[in-house]
Image (cartoon, rainbow, N blue to C red):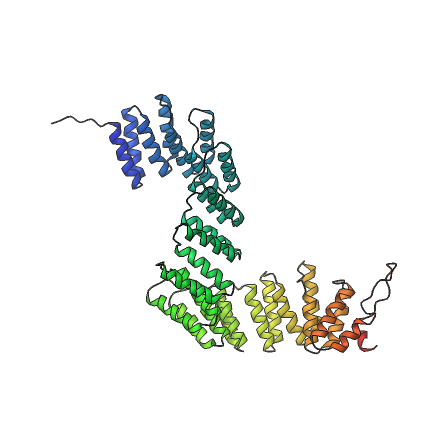
Amino acid sequence: MNNYSHCLDSYVALIGILASVRDIEGIKYLIGEVRDRGFRMTISTSNALIKSFGVLGMVEELLWIWQRMKESGIEPSLFTYNFMMDGLVNSMCLESAEKFFHVMEKGRVRPDVVTYNIMIKGYCKSGKTRDAKGKLREMEMKRVAPDKITYLTLIQACYSEEDIASCVSLFNDMVEKRLKIPSHAYSLVISGLVKEGKCYEGFAVFDHMIRNGCKANVAIYTALIDALAKSGNGAEAMKFYERMKDEGCEPDEVTYGVIVNCLCKVGRLDLALEYLMFCLEKNIKVNAVVYSSIIDGLGKGGRVDEAEKLYEEMLDKGCTPDSYCHNTLIDAFTKCGKIDEALTLFKRMEDVGCDQTVYTYTILISGLFKEHKTDEALKMWDMMIDKGITPTPASFRALSTGLCLSGKVARACKILDELASVGVIPRTTFEDMIHVLCKAGHVKEACELADGIVHRDHETPGRVCTVLINALRKAGNVDLALKLMHSQIGIQHDRWGSVKKQDKFRNLFES
């Protein structure tokens, strides 16, 4: 029988195999064997072990190998440092990686582009994007040329922080340096630009990508289709969708969601429904956003029964409606006079734990006033306040409009004062109320409201006078607007700055 003795290379090879399947327990057993046998390390075995331990985040083992190298008098190579630092960065031991980097700067083995990329990756993973950008500037000062990995890592970090200006700046640097730009970098920059509403700039980057022979992926096409749709160019969006298919780029569930939304916005509801059926037949995942888009389109198109049916189908398919979807259907119900159905759906939201947002309450308050259910609308407002939901200008506008048209101007003013006392004063609120009253022919009430606004020092008399004149003019009451314009109402100071007696707006009818 032949004698066989294990050598260090055999253990290193086995550890590498186990690292590829992430068998940490097996690796620890083999490390114990290596320690017990007292093998002498070499630069190649050390590098291989450091690489394996680094991938798995085994920091203790990394430092043990480093110590064995020092004991064996092995001088670390550039690869050794890079493997070591990459392992530390992957284990989120950034401070330790920084120490190794500083050792390199002072030693014989200087950092290269890979070393800098490792540190930039570490800073970005730790949310220290400013430090990562600093490392890029340091590279340029020390004449270490950044590569596409350097820029892609930074672009990804800036994109995640919604710093699109930096993404574009980094992209332009790559263009200037004539670096090969990965498709993912194009995707991030284009997506960032269109999210900021810079559709033209997004298409300019797309054209640059095509000219440089880089094929657009589904994410890029989808972002641009969405941008066109949101900017009101539905027809162009559909043309771009056809171009995407002609280029052999297969749409995914996100693309179909964008297309459905686009079709709903341009009123092509039947085609949107066809796309929905296509997705269901092909087992393409359909999310709540897709259903919400169609339900919204059907509701606005007066096809409320179909919208309600689609909502029920959505539930049957196991797709959970979100707040937006519920709000969309509630809005459709209120606009066609189905306030009871809207309130039932509102209660259903509560039962399933779906957040009732300020928009939910705004829709219902407006709908209840429309059905002349003033008391119920006020209860809905109180419920919203009791739940700690902060009113928006739109929600107070719905309330104040309803109260003014119901002859409860004083109640609207009282609620306005209550909001002011807690620091919530919707801008242009009194303007909206005055315009509503004038439009409804309640000019005396509008004048009384104007006097109240001045009395509570919410606005200057001159400002209120201007608002009232504009409201009268827009309501077609031009004669009264001219009368107010030539009156002394709204004049408060003489040329020496002393306060004169203020004429009341209600006196407009007596003069």
Quick one: quadrant of the N terminus? top left
Give the image location of residue 362, x and y in percent. Answer: 58, 68
Give the image location of residue 122, x and y in percent. Answer: 45, 39
Q: Is residue 417 above or below residue 131?
A: below
Give the image location of residue 186, x and y in percent. Answer: 44, 50
Please tell me which residue is depicted at 73% across the width and 75% down the height of the picture.
445
Give the image location of residue 47, x and y in percent. Answer: 34, 30
Number of on-image labels: 0
Q: Is residue 232 above or below residue 21?
A: below
Q: Is residue 372 above or below residue 12?
A: below
Please tell me which residue is depicted at 75% across the width and 69% down the height of the picture.
450
Q: Is residue 495 visible?
A: yes
- Where residue 37 sits, quadrant-wise, is top left
Q: Image check: 20 left or right of 153?
A: left
**Is 454 or 348 nearer to us in this picture?**
454
Please tell me which residue is depicted at 39% across the width and 29% down the height of the picture.
78
Q: Image check: 42 left or right of 101?
A: left
